[in-house]
Image: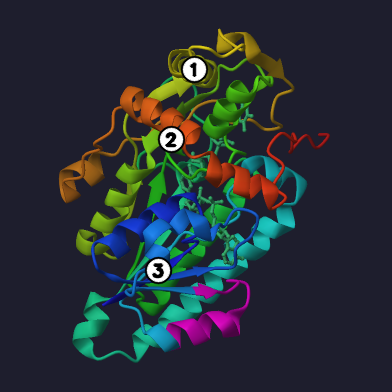
Amino acid sequence: MTTIVTGGAGFIGSALVRKLAAAGEAVVTLDSLTYAGHLQSLGEALEAPNHHFERVDIRDAEAVRAVFQKYRPSAVMHLAAESHVDRSIDSPMDFVSTNVTGTVNLLQAAQELWSALPAGEKEAFRFLQVSTDEVYGSLGPTGVFTEETPYQPNSPYSASKASSDHFARAWQRTFGLPVMISHCSNNYGPYQLPEKLIPVTILAGLEGRQIPIYGTGSNIRDWLHVEDHVEALELIVRKGTPGNTYNIGADAETTNLDMAKAICACLDEFLEDSPHRPHEGLITFVQDRPGHDLRYAIDSSRMRDELGWRPRHSLQEGLRQTVAWYLENRWWWEAIREGGFKDSERQGLAAR
Ligand code: NAD
Ligand code: DAU
């Protein structure tokens, strides 16, 4: 029973690999280590005898096929992606090649393996396409995304994820591959690269730099702790129904401005002697993201009712723990900076 986790050196993938490896499961991390992939995020899993790492680019169909034939997985949890909306505005083709072509390469490799399996193993095989709520587009002030909400992606990132979801669905409908798709809201927690709102805010506040809030800060995101996401993904693979889609969210809608203020309050509390207190004074409104989705909100009742999933982390407590983690784990983000990652550069300001 081997699981291949693509993108296992990234933020969510590493949380999943750490959990699977700690539980003694056989797990293979398949990752090309882009700017977003870091082996140090794997922690103890990196040395665990039940964990293997394969540095493979999912755009390379033959290399992907070779890994599948080598390990003959019973489950594939596909998280590898270009994941940052701002970068997709500057370099959309990277998103097309990894998120679309890469996903089709994985589906083909899985299909080849699955179709030759004996009946029992064929029945048990699962391919989980880890998608995003952003494929549904943007909500107004009311309403929620359900599994029936039509796709309406607005950014090159979400368009590429939507496209890859369609291919995943097609492989289930046309070839019978046991594919499931999950749509998750914004994740937060340890090991998130400081290009996303929460770690950007924590590190800017800590270092006394401007905290950049796009537009008026009134855009709303629905926040979910990464460990709750990972538990949901495991449940889907174990108990979900092939062909189904599952929305994952924790009912934690917050405006970006309120999120930044909440992080600043944590920093004020943890850094009593900081010259940057009150950290809220660092919040700066900057040029808006082109095509900025106003609001996301997830109805996760299928996850809760059919699979019995419940998020364990409240946003308030999860956020405090996350801020504390970044303060206590400088080694992690300093090593990433030393590797050339620049976290204070604004991206995605393409002219309309
Ligand atoms: P991330 O950017 O932190 O990690 C992506 C990982 O994929 C990295 O390890 C990177 O090296 C790897 N990767 C990228 N291109 C690759 C390629 N061509 N071949 C092999 N590996 C490659 O992303 P994340 O935030 O952990 O997101 C993981 C998945 O979850 C993505 O599919 C994303 O769309 C989805 N998702 C993310 C969120 C979120 O809030 N972060 C929410 C919902 C869904
Ligand atoms: O909803 C799920 C999606 O959440 C995932 O599919 C994506 O992979 C993930 O990156 C995330 O997308 P967002 O665009 O919502 O995340 P980001 O952290 O980039 O931005 C969150 C909000 O904060 C968004 O409204 C833009 C705003 N923002 C972001 C940054 C980086 C700022 O105001 N300032 C910033 O510096």
Identify the amino acid type marked 3: Glu
- The x, y position of residue 304, in whole percent, is 20, 42
For residue 315, which quarter of the picture?
top left
Counting other residues with Cα less than 10 Å from the Cα at mark 1, is it few (<14), some (14-19), or many (20 or more)?
some
- Disc 3 is placed on an element classified as helix
Is 33 part of what is drawn in magenta? no
Marks 1 and 2 sit apart, C-alpha to C-alpha, by 13 Å
Instruction: Name the residue beneath numbered marker 1.
Output: 271
Instruction: Name the residue beneath numbered marker 3.
Output: 47
Marks 2 and 3 sit apart, C-alpha to C-alpha, by 22 Å
The region drawn magenta spans: 54-69
Foreground pick, 281 / 234: 281
Can residue 209 be seen in the rendering of this structure?
A: yes
Q: Residue at x 68, y 53 (%)?
A: 339
Q: Is residue 11 left or right of residue 240?
A: right
Give residue 325's mark.
Answer: 2
Q: Residue at x 55, y 16 (%)?
A: 218
Quadrant (top left, top right, bottom left, bottom right) of the N terminus: bottom left
Can residue 145 be seen in the rendering of this structure?
A: no
Marks 3 and 1 sit apart, C-alpha to C-alpha, by 34 Å
- The x, y position of residue 166, in whole percent, is 49, 61
